[in-house]
Image (cartoon, helix red, strand yellow):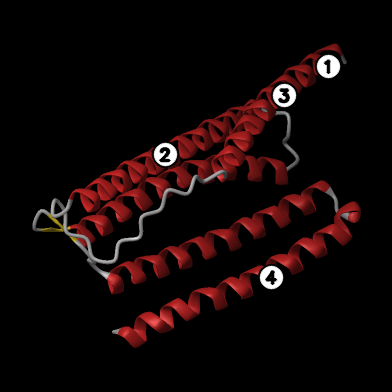
Amino acid sequence: MFTGMLGAFILIPIIGILVTVLLFYFILKFYRNENKMTFPEKIRLLRKLVNIVIIIFIVSTCIVGLLLLLVGGTFSFMGASAGTLGILLGIAGAGIQIYFYYLIYKEYKVLINNFEQEKIFEDENVTAFKKIAKVSLWILLFHLAISLVTYVINLIMVAGLYTGNIFMFNGIDINFTFDTTVLVYFIICVILNILSVVFARAVEIHKENQLTI
């Protein structure tokens, strides 16, 4: 089992290196050719990149699930296997996130199909854009909820270790690092919300101009 775990942990950085190199290639290629590309060509490129991201997400999720199964339970809480509970909670959390991403992907498909046909100023696109902005905020709130629960659990663990034999922990990593990337995600959510409002207004102006022609 140890050999399998070691191989899995070695595989992750190797995959990360390959993915990073591919991202460098795609981004530099886009940077060189961006001025020459038409709008439909950029949309087709976006479709390809999103498909790659989906594949990477599915593969990485499978790898994380495999690691969880290999590691298993590492501590006990009042006689129950907290490791098993952690795995179940991790699977539940991953399932919720996948559902959120599915909602975004569904609206993305609407946008990408219309944009490929150069149907830009459509009410359907406005609705899809607003839904993407809303679900992005749901994802942020979900991550904040996970962070809050994690901090509470860490606080309980510290209290248990400080007071003695209330809990039994074996090799638990207590981490109180604040994830500042949440602020970046919040800024992105605000930008998406603003863009959805701007896009809705652009569609209104387009319709008004069509009526005056």
Work out whether mark 4 precedes mark 2 in sequence or the reverse, and give the earlier one: 4
Amino acid under label 3? Val
Q: Residue furthest front?
A: 163
Q: Earlier in the sequence, mark 3 or mark 1?
A: 3
Q: Secondary structure at mark 3?
A: helix
Q: Nearer the viewer, residue 89 or 79?
A: 79
**Residue under pointer 1:** 209
Side (left or right) of 127 relative to 22? left
Q: Are marks 2 and 3 in contact (CB under 8 Å)?
A: no
Q: Which residue is mark 3?
A: 198
Name the element at disc 4: helix
- Closest to the camera, between mark 1 and mark 4, is 4
Left or right of 12 on screen, residue 123:
right
Residue 166 spot, x, y in % from top left = 14, 51
Q: In this figure, which residue is indicated by the disc labeled 2?
A: 142
In terms of depth relative to the viewer, which is nearer, 67 or 118?
A: 67
Spot the residue most to the right.
Answer: 36
Residue wearing tag 4: 22
Q: Residues within 10 Å of mark 1 (few under 14, many from 20)?
A: few
Q: Are marks 2 and 1 in contact (CB under 8 Å)?
A: no
Q: Position of residue 116 (x, y in %)?
A: 71, 46
Disc 2: CA contacts within 10 A as few (<14), some (14-19) or many (>=20):
some
Mark 3 and mark 1: Cα distance apart in space = 16 Å
The answer to whether 23 is drawn above or below residue 136 in the figure is below
